[in-house]
Amino acid sequence: MRWIFWIFITAALTFGGWFAWAVLSPVQPAPQTILMLRPGYSTRRIAGELKSAGVIRSEDAFVLWHYIRHRRSLKAGEYLFEKPASIIDIQKRLRRGDVYFHAVVVPEGFTMFDIAGAIEAAGLGPADEFVKAVKSDTALISDLAPNAPSLEGYLFPDTYEFTRMMTMDEMAAAMVKQFRQVARQIGLTPAQTGATMQTVSATPAISLASASRPENTNPPPDPIQRTVIMASIVEKETAVADERPLVASVYYNRLAKNIALDADPSIIYGELLSGAYGGALHHEDMRFDSRYNTYKYAGLPPGPIGNPGKNALEAAMHPAQSDYFYFVADAQGHHRFAKTMEEHNKNVAAYRRAMRGK
């Protein structure tokens, strides 16, 4: 019987040594090993995925250690394994839900189509699914823009960290949440409704439904929506922060006089919506039949034409006080502003001469 005891002891020591080696010994995975552990995976399935990827030494040791740890839940998600780690280390990560985040950079002025492309490029899903979510989740901004056709304008430019477990709706909601935070900071959406109206009405009085062009049937946007639309146009027209209040003043002045905005970026956006944009504007595009064509239809377009940043929003809220009605690029990254068409034509001629000289 003594030999049976020693066999048992030997077996126990062998198993203990193996188990300690399998659990405690770090494993070096292949560079940038990424695994998607989906909801509903059993512990055995998770262990199998980790073993197949070369992250752990033994499925059995992984499962046994999980039971020893009182079966604390392992969280689903996408995980990046790039450093040596033991089974103990890996299970700690899975219990914490230390998942891999994909950075999505949204620059100022990006449209929903640009953002959708960035999301797809980050490996988070098809671009058209994000566009679909942005067009269908307008309830997220119903208090800010009741008539908004999409979330365009309210997807705040920033750097976001998303996981592949997030839905497109959740990503869009995160961007809207950031917009709301910034809007409150700058006073665009104060707590009191009365204060909101007072802040927005500080901009020049304008006629939102122009009588000069009877074909313009755009419904007057709400005050906050009006500001976001204007900010999106300003954002697209200039990247120079100091010029934005002046650009905003030009457009507010034109609105007040029932003069068409003639904003090229709005035509581009209208063509993007219809899939007609060819990458550059031509003279015939000025006749493009869209409510976003601010050459053909007076007043503001029916919605934002991009997603403005904080500076552009502030410029739309607090435009400069000016008598300018025109502006044109100066071929050096800035703009020249004019009060009359004669002065504007001189600035245009100067721009063309500067471009020919380059």
Image: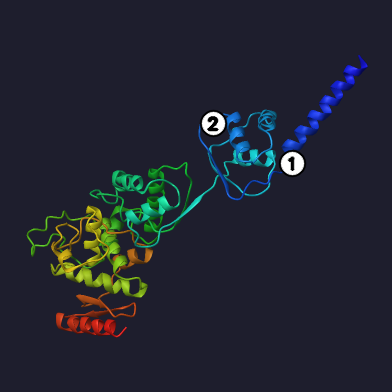
Q: Which residue is drawn at 35% across and 70% down?
A: 239
- In the rendering, which numbered label is found on residue 54? none
Which quadrant of the figure has residue 51? top right
Question: What's the residue type where badge 1 is placed?
Answer: Ser
Q: Where residue 335 appears, x then y in whole percent?
A: 29, 78
Residue 121 visible (yes or no): yes
- Residue under label 2, please give it: 41
Q: Nearer the viewer, residue 292 or 13?
A: 13
Q: In which quarter of the image is the N terminus?
A: top right
Q: Residue at x 8, y 58 (%)?
A: 215
Q: Which residue is drawn at 22% across and 56% down?
A: 276
Question: Which of the two labelled residues, at mark 1 and mark 2, occupies the earlier sequence position?
Answer: 1
Q: How crowded is mark 2: few (under 14 residues within 10 Å), some or many (20 or more)?
A: some
Q: Where 95 sits versus 154, above or below? A: above
Residue 295 visible (yes or no): no
Q: Where residue 108 appears, x then y in whole percent?
A: 37, 62
Q: Where residue 48 appears, x then y in whole percent?
A: 60, 33
Q: Which of 53 and 110 is in front in this view?
A: 53
Q: In this view, does 244 lie to the left or right of 208?
A: right
Q: Where residue 120 appears, x then y in whole percent?
A: 41, 50
Dot 1 and dot 2 residues touching (CB under 8 Å): no
Which quadrant of the figure has residue 95? top right
Give the image's coloring scheme. Answer: rainbow
- Residue under label 1, please give it: 25
Q: Nearer the viewer, residue 252 or 153?
A: 153
Question: What's the residue type where badge 2 is placed?
Answer: Tyr
Q: Quadrant of the C terminus?
A: bottom left
Q: In this view, does 64 lie to the left or right of 260?
A: right
Element class at badge 1:
loop
Q: How crowded is mark 1: few (under 14 residues within 10 Å), some or many (20 or more)?
A: some
Element class at badge 2:
loop
Q: Where 97 sits versus 303, above or below? A: above
